[in-house]
Amino acid sequence: MEASNNPQQNKFGNWLKTSITARMLIVGFLSFVLLIPLFFIQDLIRERSHRQTQVINEINQQWGNEVLIYGPILKVPYKTYQEKTVTDKKTKAVYTETIEDIKNAYFFPEKLNINSTINPEEKKRGIYTTAVYNSKMNITGAFTKPVFSDIDINDKDILWDKAKIIIQSSNVKGVNEANLNLDSTNYELTSKYNGKKNYNTNQLVLHTLETKTLNKNQLLFQKPLSFNINFNIKGSEQIRFIPTGKQTEAEITSNWQTANFFGEFLPFNDDKINKDGFHAKWKILDLNRPFSQEHYNGIPDLKEFAFGVNFMIPVDEYQKSERSAKYGFLVIGLTFLVFFLIQTLSKINIHPFQYLMIGLALTMFYTLLVSISEHSNFLKAYLIAGISVIALITLYSKSILKTFKFPLFIGLSLTALYTFIYVIIQLENYALLVGSIGLFLILTSVMYVSRKIDWNNG
């Protein structure tokens, strides 16, 4: 056999073993290589989060999507006239023709009172859960006589015998009961197809429920026209109302403990949350909203002024997992730095393959975290994944470093690092501040320890 006595190879091999610069280059290269599995893990988290959204949307569509109530609204048709100049093709005579057109005016009620009792429940499919509910609501109030003076319409051109009351809702599929009583006269609400479908989940489509033409005698308005509407409707995630009344008052009662009030207007009562759920109250005046009581050019889009309650179950495990994965490179880099400092100060040789195994063990933390958090809460998943990885790396480093003090130091360092990242994930307003302070302290510690290293030996 022919032995290899190439002095160049021996010199390069010794440089790799003894040079601090060579070790730094190898550790840096391995750190960047481990970014590849970290990117795949982040894609996995996003994929699982997207799957969760799909399943929840499927459950909601089958049960009934979120509920947005807009109304009631009094619709009164009226005639308009427009003169048009016409030229006769044969005689070339020019004359004026009056064209009649029928338009609709929409009037909001003078008073609107909403009283709703909501009973949410959890619906599960596989490992995913969403909130659905049954809502019983009673809507009362009164209309005053509409005024057409703003558009200069004669009384004879107002088609009172064609007037109707309409209500718009984002969810007609979930309606189980809808009764309207107008001054002791019952009217049936029927669905009217508006030619729109909710293909875009970000754009909420409102569907119309309307009565038949109202009794003309009721529209004499010798007194305010009072109404009483009973709604039983199934929905999911949230319920909202648009304050169409000149004075709108609303009360929502539920046994749901983790309600989130949102929208343009919030409840005014401080005791809305109690041990049995919540009882929230709103009072909104026409002075509080930037729209009028009458509209002559169609029903305006006022969804942005809605108020209501959100019943969604706060599931943010995927979001927290994704945030923790973003710190993956920091964890790998700092862990490698600890091993590098121990190797340099103690003269213990650590093979690049051993660095690679340690880095892969650190990436396994995130797959464990995601998989366990799908079946438990985030804290338990974080503890199980963290303890498992810290124990694995500590025991593995014992076989490399041959002592107890260095593996113990590594275990404590990883524990402090994972605890630090968990605290940052939980914080919102102070995450940047705490993170900056923590990184500053880490840098200070590294600078303090590395001062003993002879960097000229490289």
Image (cartoon, grey):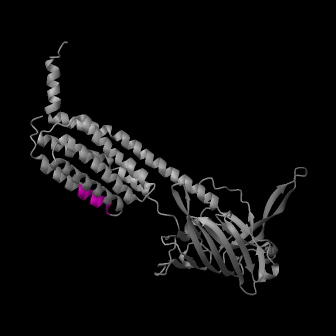
Q: Is residue 79 above or below residue 37?
A: below
Q: Is residue 306 above or below residue 7?
A: below
| Residue located farthest toward the bottom when viewing the structure as drawn | 223
Q: Is residue 98 left or right of residue 134?
A: right
Residue 44 picture location, percent across and down: 44, 45
Q: Residue at x 50, y 74 (%)?
A: 266
Residue 332 picture location, percent across and down: 28, 45
Residue 5 picture location, percent across and down: 14, 17
Residue 357 picture location, percent across and down: 29, 39
The image quadrant of residue 23 is top left
Does residue 398 appear in this view? yes
Q: Quadrant of the C terminus?
A: top left
Closest to the observer: 33 or 209? Answer: 33
Q: Quadrant of the N terminus?
A: top left
Q: Is residue 248 left or right of residue 224?
A: left
Does residue 296 appear in this view? no
Secondary structure mainly formed by the magenta segment: helix
Count all numbered tags in the image, as a single digit.
Answer: 0
User: Is 253 inside the magenta-drawn segment?
Assistant: no
Q: Is residue 100 left or right of residue 235?
A: right
Q: Residue at x 49, y 81 (%)?
A: 269
User: Is 435 inside the magenta-drawn segment?
Assistant: yes
Q: Is residue 283 above or below residue 30?
A: below
Q: Bounds of the magenta span?
A: 430-438
| Residue located farthest toward the right when viewing the structure as drawn | 91
